[in-house]
């Protein structure tokens, strides 16, 4: 069923009433293009890795331009629209003609989804009724904390009471997923317990927790670390344990990113499914697989169970999709096989990866791997366990097929 994403443009921080204290785009520098899976073979840098990934829009897009885009997309589609999602670099709640935009979309009579919004731009308590009447079906809403004072202080929400009252009304009328970046000492502990209770009592479907990142290794690749000087971070393990204990205490679904979805058992839920693991192809080739620090041990275990005889090499970066060329430079090429597979979404240019990973004089075959092997907590929030398992079966199956196709005997 066709889906439509409506891109409203906008700049993080600038088109959301100022930066939240923890915003990933705060202090982001205009770093040179990284190179990525979309780049042409002989040029490092394309629209995606030089602009989109940094959300470098010039501001919100005009409503007529958005309307033209919608019309053009609809003309190319066949069948009934199953869902329309509003997303952009800026915050939808701060879009200057938000009500007109929603009216325009409502005319298409498909369920409306609002991708992340902070709600900082919602100042009129009546807005929840307006949205529900126009078919709002799902919204991801950054709550941060159920305390208005904390929202005011750390998100710089000028009207936190109104934002929370709208969130409350929406919980009663559509699927609401709360979201919060967890900053130790600010909105964790008792504050987080209260936030969970607040959401659950009002009928939210779930809460997506994101570990606060403050270092390049934890994902700040735009020259923007630290976001909050002196602020401590949870380790991945501490964060995972926190998500586990919260999910035991509440009925609504609680997931975390980078780890984990306790209900589904992902990422890499397939590890507890012997029958499905047996459906994966056997590994017959020799190739090193580079991955992020969080995923590497999981991938090693899965591949080992299919007969793999080499190493999954962890980069310093925790998240595979955020690996950049400096992470590959820190690996010792001498530890690698003659064939190396690196994460499909890594921000490196293929040719540069080959040069760096062949720096010891051995001319290696370097191959970009599948885009996804599993679902993180943000992705799995709206998925069933079977959907996640299917995704893993396909992604990991493709990885093994690449190892067998390019790997040495
Ligand atoms: S609302 Fe989102 S994009 Fe805007 S400043 Fe806050 S965290 Fe950044």
Image (cartoon, rainbow, N blue to C red):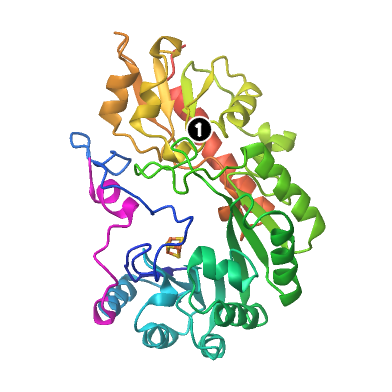
Q: How many marks?
A: 1
| Disc 1: residue Cβ within 8 A of ligand 1's nearest atom | no
Residue 51 in magenta stretch: yes
Q: Specify whether 399 is left or right of 243.
A: left
In the rendered image, the vertical position of residue 211 relative to residue 408, given as above or below = below
In the rendered image, the vertical position of residue 388 relative to residue 337, given as above or below = below
Please name the residue shown 35% across and 50% down the image.
Answer: 27
Q: Residues within 10 Å of mark 1 (few under 14, many from 20)?
A: many
Please name the residue shown 41% across and 62% down the image.
Answer: 19
Task: Specify the quadrant of the image occupied by residue 280.
Answer: top right
Which of 260/391 is in front? 260
Q: Secondary structure at mark 1?
A: loop
Q: Would you name the residue on which mark 1 appears?
A: 292
Residue 205 in magenta stretch: no
Which of 7/76 is in front? 7
Q: Is residue 89 visible?
A: yes
**Residue 312: % across, % down:** 53, 22
Task: Return the residue found at the far left.
Answer: 42
Q: Specify whether 153 is left or right of 35.
A: right
Which residues, given as a range, are shown in magenta?
45-65
In the rendered image, the vertical position of residue 300 relative to residue 125, given as above or below = above
**Residue 284: % across, % down:** 53, 18
Q: Ligand 1 shows up in which quadrant of the image?
A: bottom left
In the rendered image, the vertical position of residue 185 relative to residue 142, given as above or below = above
**Residue 165: % across, % down:** 61, 82
**Residue 226: % across, % down:** 44, 43
Task: Specify the quadrant of the image occupied by residue 11.
Answer: bottom left
Task: Return the residue found at the far front.
Answer: 230
Please name the residue shown 32% across and 67% down the image.
Answer: 10
């Amino acid at each position: 069923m066709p889906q439509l994403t409506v891109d409203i443009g906008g700049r993080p921080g600038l088109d959301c009433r100022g930066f939240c204290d923890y915003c990933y785009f705060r202090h982001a520098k205009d770093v040179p293009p990284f190179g990525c899976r979309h780049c042409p073979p002989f040029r490092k840098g394309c629209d995606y890795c030089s602009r989109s990934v940094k959300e470098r829009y010039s501001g919100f897009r005009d409503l007529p331009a958005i309307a033209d885009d919608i019309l053009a997309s609809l003309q190319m589609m066949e069948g009934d629209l199953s869902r329309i999602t509003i997303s952009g670099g800026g915050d939808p709640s701060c879009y200057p003609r938000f009500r007109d935009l929603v009216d325009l979309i409502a005319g298409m009579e498909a369920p409306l989804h609002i991708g992340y919004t902070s709600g900082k731009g919602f100042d009129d308590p009546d807005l929840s009724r307006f949205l529900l009447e126009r078919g709002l079906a799902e919204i991801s809403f950054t709550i941060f904390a159920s305390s208005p004072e904390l929202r005011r202080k750390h998100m710089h929400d000028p009207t936190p009471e109104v934002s929370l009252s709208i969130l409350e009304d929406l919980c009663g009328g559509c699927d609401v997923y709360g979201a919060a970046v967890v900053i130790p000492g600010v909105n964790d502990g008792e504050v987080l317990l209260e936030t969970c209770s607040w959401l659950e009592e009002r009928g939210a479907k779930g809460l997506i927790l994101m570990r606060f990142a403050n270092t390049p290794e934890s994902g700040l690749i735009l020259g923007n670390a630290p976001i909050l000087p002196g602020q401590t971070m949870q380790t991945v393990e501490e964060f995972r344990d926190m998500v586990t204990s919260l999910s035991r205490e509440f009925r609504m679904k609680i997931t975390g990113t980078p780890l984990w979805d306790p209900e589904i058992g992902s990422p890499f839920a397939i590890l507890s499914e012997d029958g499905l693991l047996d459906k994966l192809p056997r590994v017959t080739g020799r190739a090193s697989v580079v991955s992020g620090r969080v995923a590497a041990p999981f991938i090693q275990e899965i591949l080992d169970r299919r007969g793999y005889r080499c190493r999954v090499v962890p980069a310093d970066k925790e998240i595979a999709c955020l690996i950049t060329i400096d992470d590959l430079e820190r690996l010792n090429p001498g530890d690698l096989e003659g064939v190396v597979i690196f994460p499909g979404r890594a921000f490196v240019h293929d040719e540069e990866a080959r040069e760096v990973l062949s720096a010891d004089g051995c001319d290696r075959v370097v191959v970009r791997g599948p885009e996804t092997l599993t679902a993180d907590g943000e992705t799995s929030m709206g998925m069933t366990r079977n959907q996640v398992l299917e995704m893993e079966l396909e992604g990991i199956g493709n990885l093994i097929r690449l190892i067998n196709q390019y790997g040495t005997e």
